[in-house]
Structure formats: structure tokens, C-alpha cells
Amino acid sequence: MSPKAQTRLLFLVCLLLFAQCGTSKRDDATLRFFQRGNIEMKKGNTPEAIRLYTEAIEADRDYADAYNNRGVAYIKYGDAEKAAADFNQAIQLAPDYTDAYFNRAQAYEKAGQLEKSLKDLDRVAETFKDSSKVFLSRALIKAQLNDYVNALPDFDRAIALDPRSAEAYVNRGVIRYGLGKYAGAETDFDQALRLQTNQDFAMNNLAQLRIREKKYAEALVLLDKAIALNPRQPYYRNNRGFVKMQLGQVEEGGVEVRQSLAEDAKNGWAHRNLGVYWVLKNNHAEALASLQKAGNLAANIEMLHYYKGLAYSGLGDKPAACREWKLSAELGEKEAAQVLETHCR
């Protein structure tokens, strides 16, 4: 009953903050506001940095760098809309301001405007041909757009430019996993852990490979380590809940899945695993409700049709069960093919 468990991409906020240096035509008061804003950003005092950049802008409405840096501050503050507006203004004032295009791509990503983000990154990649973080950022956007095939060369390029980037390896591993390149995925996750021994995301993803192999005890060890490093990550807890259920710890697994749902109620994979819990408890009505909700929340959840077939079978609806198992078998899920052969001739 082992599906591929849930994997996610690890997104980094890579932003370019302009630091004033050398000579400038701007008056000393304007520059002081700008430089003090940079200092507050380094301290992590984002609201004060925004205030200081605003002072610089009010003193000089043509200060493209101040708009760019305030946009960076707005992203860190969680306001992607205001950030994009500032980057737009910086670009209007300086049409070749490549850093602002890169930063605007991050703002668009935060706002869910992925096509716009990709367009900006395409432009930036033409200028910053040797920047690992540019190709990594573009690869992540392509991956979000489910363009795994074209994301992979960008991950390759990012790693070639920066072979010490654990984040590039772990994300390329996710893409390889999604493309069914499991050996390559494992190599990438292992390399990420060699570079960054506390890389909890790589541990979680290695656990997914162990789940595929039904090596649940090994998966549990990896997930325990990942959760110890990042205890509030609901996807790790959801995966551990599934593993515990496969190890016969049904109640403990159900608690983990519910905890995951309390953190993210829209996680279709967690609703699927709650359905698995109810199947194991022989409460097939509750199982079907959870599994249907899972399908409504997310596409391509593996083994979903298989478990729905079990729920329908438990409810005595053999035709519906066989329909679900057939759909599962058509997706290449071996468990369903075996059940079809036994129960649906």
C-alpha cells in the first residue's frame, strides 16, 4: 500500500539589495536615509527600513535604488503587491535595472503570478549568465508551473555554477523524483546532506524514497530527524503519520495526520492519509469523505483511487470499487492491478 509520499520544493527568498557606494549626486540627507535603511534591513528591522527608504524616496522621487530596496523590504514584510509596485517604479526610472527585474520576479512568485515571474527571470538570465541563484530561481518557477522537463536543465546549470548549493541539489532531487528518476533523486538528496548535515528537507525526501521501497522503519528514522530539526513543518508530520500507520501504529499515525491538518487544512495529501486511517479503522464512510476531499483539493494524489476503491468495497459498492481500482491500475499502481485481478473479473 505504499504510495509516493508528499514532496515539496524548498523555496528560497533570494533578493538583491543595492548598497550605496562611491560617489552620488544625491544630497547627504537623502543618502543617510537610504544607508540607514540598509542598516535596519541587516538588523532584521523591516518596518523601520521601510520607513527610512520612504524618507529617501520622498526626498528624491527619482531614486531607483531606494524603490528597489524598499521593494525588498516589502517582500520580507509579506506585502508582495507593494513590493512589485516599487520594483515597477525602479524599472520605470532605470529600464536596464537587472536587479530590480530579478527582485520583481520574486514578488510575482509570492503573489502567485508565475508566468510574469518567469518572464522577468528569462530577461535576467540573459544578463546574469553566471549566476547560480538566477537559474535556481527560474528552475523553481518552472517546477511550480509543472514544467519539470525544462526545469531540470536550469537546476543542472545552477549546480554547475555553484556545486556547494545544498538547496539546488535537494530541489533537483524533487524534480528527478517527480520525473521517476529515483536513483538520481537519491543521489541529489544524499549530496545535499553531505553539504548541509541538518538539511531537514533532504531527510524528508529521502524518507519518501524509503516509503516507495516499503522500508518504513528506515523512513521513520529519517522523518524523526527531520521533525526534530523542523518541528512545525506539517508535511513532514503528515508523512510520518502515514509511515506509522504502515508500521501498525494506526492511532499514533492518525494523531500525526490530524496535527498536520491543523497546520494546513487544505493539504490534499493529509486528507488522503486521513482517509487511509479510516480505511484501517474500517470506517469506510468517513474514509470516502476524506478521500473525496483530498481529490477536490489537489490533483494527481497517488494511490487516491486505490484507497477510494477500498472504501467503496467496505461500503458494499463493488462496481464503484472496481471503477476506482481500474483508474488506479491505469496509473501504474501495482496494488490496484492485483485487487482488480482478484475481485473485479
Image: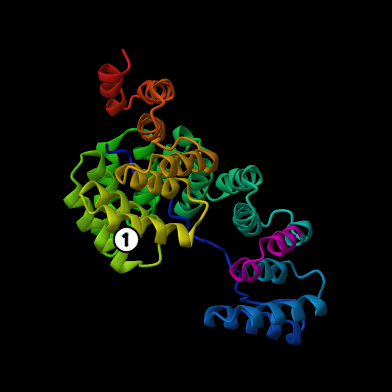
Magenta segment main secondary structure: helix
Residue in view at x 42 percent, y 50 percent: 270
Give, as a three-letter code, the residue at label 1: Asp
Residue at 63% over, 75% down: 20
Mark 1 falls on what kind of element?
helix
Seen from the viewer's position, the closer of residues 323 and 184 is 323
**The C terminus: image quadrant:** top left
Q: Residue 247: give x, y in percent of width and height.
A: 20, 49
Q: Nearer the viewer, residue 66 or 143?
A: 143
Reply yes or no: does residue 81 show up in magenta.
yes
Region in magenta = 73-88
Q: Residue 99 appears at what percent x and percent y? A: 62, 59
Compared with 237, 305 (above or below) is above
- Label 1 Cα crowd, 10 Å radius (few <14 / some 14-19 / many 20+): many
Q: Residue placed at 68% from the left, 79% from the top?
A: 34
Quarter of the image for residue 106 reads: bottom right
Can you say whether 273 is above or below 85 in the image?
above
Position in image of residue 264 (x %, y %): 49, 58
Q: Is residue 332 above or below residue 207?
A: above
Q: Nearer the viewer, residue 145 or 258?
A: 258
**For the N terminus, which image quadrant?**
top left
